[in-house]
Image (tube, rainbow, N blue to C red):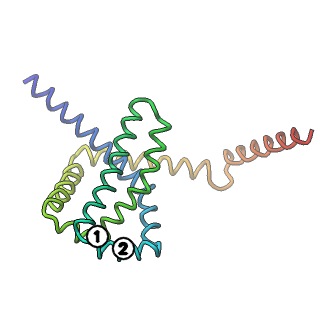
């Protein structure tokens, strides 16, 4: 009985970790950074030409090209995670920041050639398993609770930002006044 309780807590902890990672990637990385890059990339005329060329490629060449890019991007993400754990925060952040636009391109490439890539049975199977895993995470009660908490925190940040950093409120006035004082002092020091 005690072992079952320990296993249940371990499973709950693993679910919590997966959910937090998923929400951070979904809300912060994808919504905040990657999706805008994806939309920008998608609108570029040169990529429309590239899309036509990719769709004409031999399906095996396309698969190899996609897998090389995909594995490279995911490997960079894992390497950034290892670096972060080792305390190399700046290097990990830079590596991950560099990975995001490339990941957006890989995402675009997948959507541009999805039917060809999914024509491989094993690829379709893996893709469906990944989607099923994401659905499994989203079905968890802990996911719904964590997402709601994340929305609340986001709402507090938005309200704080609106209250203190938009328009002509007292805090932003103080910052602007302090900035002008510091700027004048620096300029006055340069003239001496």
Q: Is label 2 in a helix, a strand or a loop?
A: helix
Viewer-proximal residue among 163 and 144: 144
Q: Residue furthest left?
A: 1
Mark sitting on residue 113: 1
Q: Secondary structure at mark 1?
A: loop
For image coordinates 29% across by 76% down, the residue present is 56
> How many angstroms separate mark 2 from mark 1 (CA)?
8 Å
User: Where is residue 166, by image quadrant?
Assistant: bottom right
Answer above or below: position of 110 versus 176: below
**Residue 176 image offset from top left, x and y in percent:** 73, 47
Residue 130 place in picture, x, y as percent: 21, 54
Instruction: State how many labels appear.
Output: 2
User: Mark 2 highlights which residue?
Assistant: 51
Q: Quadrant of the C terminus?
A: top right
**Which picture quadrant has residue 107?**
bottom left
**Residue nearer the viewer, 33 or 6:** 33
Q: Nearer the viewer, residue 109 or 58?
A: 58
Around disc 2, counting alpha carbons within 10 Å, would you say few (fewer than 14), some (14 to 19), or many (20 or more)?
some
Residue found 42% across the figure and 70% down from its top: 42
- Percent from the top left, x then y, of residue 150? 38, 46
Q: Earlier in the sequence, mark 2 or mark 1?
A: 2
On screen, 189 above or below 166? above
Q: Pick the quarter of the image with the N terminus.
A: top left
How far across and down, in percent of the image, does residue 103 sit?
38, 56
When the figure is inspected, residue 110 is found, relative to residue 186, above or below; the finding is below
Residue contact between numbered discs 2 and 1, judged by CB atoms under 8 Å: yes
């Amino acid at each position: 009985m005690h072992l079952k309780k320990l296993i249940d807590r371990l499973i709950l902890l693993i679910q919590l970790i997966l959910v937090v990672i998923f929400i951070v990637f979904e809300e912060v990385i994808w919504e905040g950074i990657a999706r805008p890059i994806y939309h920008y990339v998608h609108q570029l005329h040169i990529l429309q030409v590239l899309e036509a060329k990719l769709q004409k490629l031999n399906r095996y060449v396309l698969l190899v090209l996609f897998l090389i890019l995909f594995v490279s991007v995911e490997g960079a993400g894992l390497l950034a995670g290892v670096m972060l754990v080792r305390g190399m925060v700046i290097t990990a952040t830079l590596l991950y920041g560099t990975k995001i636009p490339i990941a957006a391109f890989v995402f675009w490439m997948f959507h541009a050639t999805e039917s060809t890539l999914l024509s491989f049975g094993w690829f379709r199977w893996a893709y469906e398993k990944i989607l099923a895993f994401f659905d499994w995470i989203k079905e968890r009660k802990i996911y719904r609770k964590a997402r709601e908490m994340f929305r609340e925190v986001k709402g507090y940040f938005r309200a704080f930002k609106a209250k203190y950093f938009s328009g002509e409120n007292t805090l932003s006035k103080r910052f602007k006044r302090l900035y002008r004082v510091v700027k004048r002092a620096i300029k006055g020091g340069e003239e001496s």
